[in-house]
């Protein structure tokens, strides 16, 4: 128990204060990584360890990207319910590209600030391959017919895709891509990680 408390204090001293839902990653000499959001630490349960000693670098990179995607989505979800504000990037108000921009920036990934420019980043993927952390782009009614909206995939199972985004009417919400409006406005999905 004392070991856990000491380990927690050490890890907390090195963690960033930019989010209440930070990441704890500890690499030990035994090739194990311990990763868990700060909010989910239960001092009575042992940390989950993944044995990486027989894992290839490519597989390790893939696992790291998956962990990062989960933490980016977790960070974005702290804005759920925040009102829409054009150009906003804070809890006082945020727009769709601000939500994505800030969620990735919190993990040192800098994207362009507009959804139109974000749609030029990463790798274009099919919806069948969409996974947590991918971006969805939409053309909503605007005069130039450009990409004008972006959402972050929070769940993708059996063709059912849910994404978090900021709307002018409801602020930051989670929507289902199968909703008629979003299905009709959908343009493409892209993978940044």
Image: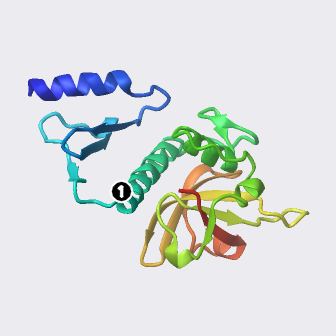
Counting from the top left corner in percent of width and height, residue 100 is at 61, 48
The quadrant where residue 46 appears: top left
Image position of 98 with respect to 189: above or below: above
Report whether 192 appears left or right of 184: left
Looking at the rendered structure, the secondary structure element under dot 1 is: helix
* Figure colour scheme: rainbow
Nearer to me, 183 or 168: 183
Image position of 117 with respect to 88: above or below: below
Residue at x 20% of width, y 53% of height: 51
Residue at x 64% of width, y 75% of height: 183
Report whether 157 appears left or right of 139: left
Counting from the top left corner in percent of width and height, residue 37 is at 34, 40
Nearer to me, 183 or 111: 111
Image position of 140 with respect to 105: above or below: below
In the picture of the structure, the residue carrying the numbered disc 1 is 60
Nearer to me, 95 or 75: 75
């Amino acid at each position: 128990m004392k070991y856990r408390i000491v380990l927690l204090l050490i890890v907390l001293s090195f963690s960033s204060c930019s989010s209440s839902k930070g990441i704890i990653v500890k690499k030990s000499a035994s090739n194990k990584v311990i990763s868990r959001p700060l909010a989910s630490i239960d001092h009575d349960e042992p940390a989950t360890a993944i044995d990486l000693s027989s894992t290839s670098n490519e597989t390790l990179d893939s696992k790291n990207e998956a962990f990062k995607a989960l933490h980016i989505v977790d960070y974005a979800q702290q804005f759920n319910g925040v009102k829409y504000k054009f150009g906003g990037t804070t809890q006082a108000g945020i727009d769709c590209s601000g939500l994505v921009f800030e969620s990735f920036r919190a993990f040192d990934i800098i994207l362009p600030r507009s959804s139109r420019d974000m749609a030029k980043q990463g790798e274009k993927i099919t919806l069948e391959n969409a996974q947590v952390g991918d971006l969805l782009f939409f053309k909503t009614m605007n005069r130039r017919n450009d990409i004008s909206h972006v959402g972050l995939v929070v769940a993708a199972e059996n063709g059912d895709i849910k994404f978090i985004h900021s709307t002018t009417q409801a602020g930051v919400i989670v929507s289902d891509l199968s909703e008629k409006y979003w299905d009709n406005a959908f343009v493409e999905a892209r993978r940044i990680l």
